Amino acid sequence: MKRKFIYFFVFPFFLLLLLGSFVSDNGYFSISQKDVEFHIPKGFPQPFYDIKKNIPTPAGFVLGRKLFYDPILSKDSSVSCGFCHQRIAGFAHIDHALSHGINGLIGKRNVPPLENLIWSNSFMWDGRINHLEVQPLAPITNPIEMNETLQNVLKKLQRNREYVTMFKAAFNDTIIDSRNMLRAISQFLALMISADSRYDKYMNGEDTLSVAELSGLQLFRDNCAQCHKEPLFTDNTFRNTGLAMDSALQDSGVAAINGDMKDFMKFKVPSLRNVEMTYPYMHDGRFRNLKQVLDHYTKKFTPESHADPILVKGIQLTELEKADIIAFLKTLTDQKFLHDRRFADPNGHF
Amino acid sequence: MVRKLVYSVLCIAALVAAMSFTAPGYGKLTIRFENFVGDKPLKLDSVYYKNALGQSYNVSMFKYYVGNFHLKNKEGKEFISRGYYLINQEEKNSMQITIDSVPFGEYKGIEFTLGVDSIDNCSGAQSGALDPVNGMFWAWNTGYIFLKMEGQSPFSNATGKRLEFHIGGYKQQNNCIKQIHFEYRLQIKENENEKIFIDADASKLFSSPNLIDFSKISSVTDFHNAKAIADNYSGMFRIIDYGNY
């Protein structure tokens, strides 16, 4: 009798408990209304992206996140957005100079980090994409990234019962179309806001910076902030940073898009938020660390070099000053953003 | 109780009936597009045509965006119907478009856009005619492809002797948006569906003002040479006047 009790009641109970511990995520991945509320951080300007036209909802955000981490978007289900855009690296590809894609192919550019995207009016290193919502189409259809067609992606999603349910929940629409897919991904991307670094806390009077960091901030403002404008640390312009063109990549930047030689080797000024984590640096990832970047910018550039006038005028920094600037740049690391559970891969690949 | 139900059913029926009629003061305008090569109606794949240089070619795909139709009345006032249509030789239904609720009156001119206005190139994810799934959108370099013509020519030096003309570009330096304008008298009347006929001559893409030699240019898929083709396609339409007036 007692043995029967154990077999029929106690054992199944523990089995269920065990199973439950695998299945349940203890709320780690669940998204509440509060999780998708949007606020402009203190000191930030109005965003370019009109979030009122695509207000994030828990269901829309969760759908966007699932799409972001789902290799179903690639031709052979091998590559997801999150494959190259890693959360711990500010959604850049840590320690990879050039982007990786399908079939082990290597791209021509360094994976840009994803953060504060709604304050950007152009995307990609050469600004070829003009709106956040259509940005995902570029990597999806690029033959050396995900190499898939939009038609195929939609077919795969329409065949997938889980997606049918999620689209219905997010858009109250039984039709899975490109617009809803892109708007869901945009809801996820729009909330990737990094504005809680030690620098931000210092600016808001909630934290202090060390002597070296403060000296670095002043030097940064005197020498770098004209392009890397606070608080976004970019002015969203395209500039020639005086780099020699890589002979293998033959990448002429914006000029390759519009044919205008005035734009030769111009690339987008990247934000420096979380820059500590987004190494290596520059459009082709040629510099391994921040010291190499500063060494480059303090070189002499002749007017014939096509380099930006600011660089031709010259930036002079001592080794100690460079160290101070690097100390300051590390205060832009936003631990809260880099470890934000909302942006984690719900399949558990961290 | 029953009477109430009958009344409400009647009311709804009346409402539905009222809604199904065109509102007074407005009529319909149907615009029918037909594609030609020279003076012959365009036939996909099977027929070989000759360009102005005598180089033969066929057409396997021919589609383009038209939109934002303007009608001008005598006083110079305009009726504008916003929105785009994808005219696709392969889809018969796409060749005819109907604009509802055009105010009554006499109009003396019609204008429309060949392509997609710059604002609509910069508005994010869109549906309907502008859904990127229609294949008329550059994913790698945001913007709509205004006109696609594909085919083959023995003079082409591309793989498979292909011709590939994907024309678009909304930015100032590479702008391929064209406004098409016709002086044309038409009358919109109550409960009448006015029809106009517009022909597009695909051969114009390669003839004037810019003569295209297929042995030199067989593919245009970005800004290179796009404006030359756009200047050509701005003259490909003509309106057929059947002498109604």
Image (cartoon, coloured by chain):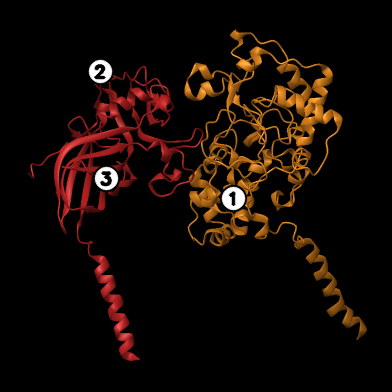
**Same chain for the residues at labels 1 and 2, yes or no?**
no
Q: Count neighbours of disc 2 (C-alpha within 10 A) and say few if under 14, some if 14 to 19, many if 20 or more.
A: few
User: Foreground mark, 2 or 3?
Assistant: 3
Q: Residue at x 41, y 27 (%)?
A: B172
User: Foreground mark, 3 or 1?
Assistant: 1
Asked whether residue A54 is in view, the answer is yes
Residue B16, percent from left and from top: 28, 71
Q: Which chain is red?
A: B
Q: Count neighbours of disc 1 (C-alpha within 10 A) and say few if under 14, some if 14 to 19, many if 20 or more.
A: many
**Residue occupied by mark 3:** B95
Q: Which mark is residue A187?
A: 1
For the image, the number of numbered tags is 3
Spot the residue most to the front. A205
**Residue occupied by mark 2:** B53
Distance between mark 1 and mark 2 Cα atoms: 53 Å
Q: Residue at x 41, y 41 (%)?
A: B120
Q: Residue at x 73, y 36 (%)?
A: A274
